[in-house]
Amino acid sequence: MTDLLFREDAYLRDAPARVVAHTDEGGIVLDASIFYPTGGGQPGDSGRLDWSGGGLAIATAVKGEGGTVVLVPAEPLPLPRVGTQVMQVLDWERRHRHMRVHTALHLLSVVIPLPVTGGQIGAGSGRLDFAMPQPPEDREALEEALNALVDRDLVVSSDWIEAEVLEAHPELIKTMSVSPPRGEGKVRLVRIGQGGDQVDLQPCGGTHVARTGEIGRIRLGKIENKGKQNRRVNISLD
């Protein structure tokens, strides 16, 4: 398995690692990764690898077999050999925008407390699909509620719980289309707010900002009809 460094510290911009394998498709597997692999609606990270005598741009990261993260080169250039020590460097600006949007979408699921049927995170915008027969009546009130949560500058943190605990509390699962992130019998929860200020707690394997104030202003975009019982709510960040 790849050691998922981004789970422990989403703010790591660079980190050393060792090449442990190449895939048949020309991907690179490291023993530890700061690159988030595509999943849960969040795109894979981009950046580069540098090593003694070489370097390579990374277009994205995807999930591989056996809990590994596979880095996909941007060009068909020679790969670092297995065993090579490399330095991973993130495209930090892009990753940070993903973090801001991802946390903003969690807040969207707070102000619209309905089951989530899908979602997508972009670099500066995103959307959630809700099981929502009718569109919201007051868009301005929704946008104000979102930004009020941002302005409270709530702490964002994560915890791991036993899978059995989640099974006993299915109400924590808001997203109907994505399985909760599991690892060795445990599930990762992302919490927004602490104690009496807690506003959200749900399973999530993605990367988030440390406080809601870091998101910046959220603008509510188009609300689209995606079926009789489904509405797509778009947001963007300043």
Image (cartoon, rainbow, N blue to C red):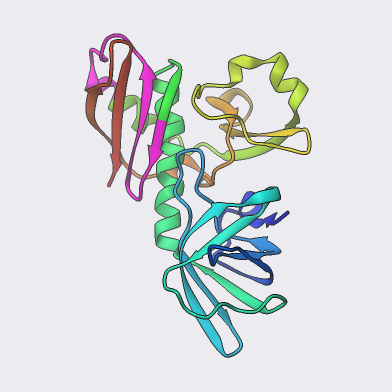
Q: Residue 152: x, y in percent?
A: 45, 34
Q: Is residue 161 above or below residue 45?
A: above
Q: Residue 104: x, y in percent?
A: 41, 37
Q: Determine whether, in the image, residue 68 is placed left or right of residue 161.
A: left
Q: Determine whether, in the image, residue 80 is placed left or right of residue 186.
A: left
Residue range (magenta): 119-142
Residue at x-position 61% and y-position 56%: 69
Q: Residue 159: x, y in percent?
A: 69, 36
Q: Does the segment drawn in magenta span residue 195?
A: no
Residue at far front of view: 24
Q: Residue 222: x, y in percent?
A: 21, 29
Residue at x-position 57% and y-position 21%: 173
Q: Is residue 94 above or below residue 231?
A: below
Question: Can I make out residue 13 in this image?
Answer: yes
Residue at far bottom of view: 53
Q: How many marks?
A: 0
Nearest to the observer: residue 151 or residue 94: 94
Q: Determine whether, in the image, residue 221 is placed left or right of residue 218.
A: left
Residue at x-position 77% and y-position 21%: 164
- The image quadrant that residue 128 belongs to is top left
Q: Is residue 90 above or below residue 111?
A: below
Nearest to the observer: residue 219 or residue 92: 92
- The image quadrant that residue 202 belongs to is top right
Q: Determine whether, in the image, residue 18 is placed left or right of residue 44.
A: right
Rendered-image quadrant of the N terminus: bottom right
- The image quadrant that residue 231 belongs to is top left
Nearest to the observer: residue 6 or residue 65: 65
Q: Does the segment drawn in magenta span residue 135?
A: yes
Question: Can I make out residue 198 in this image?
Answer: no
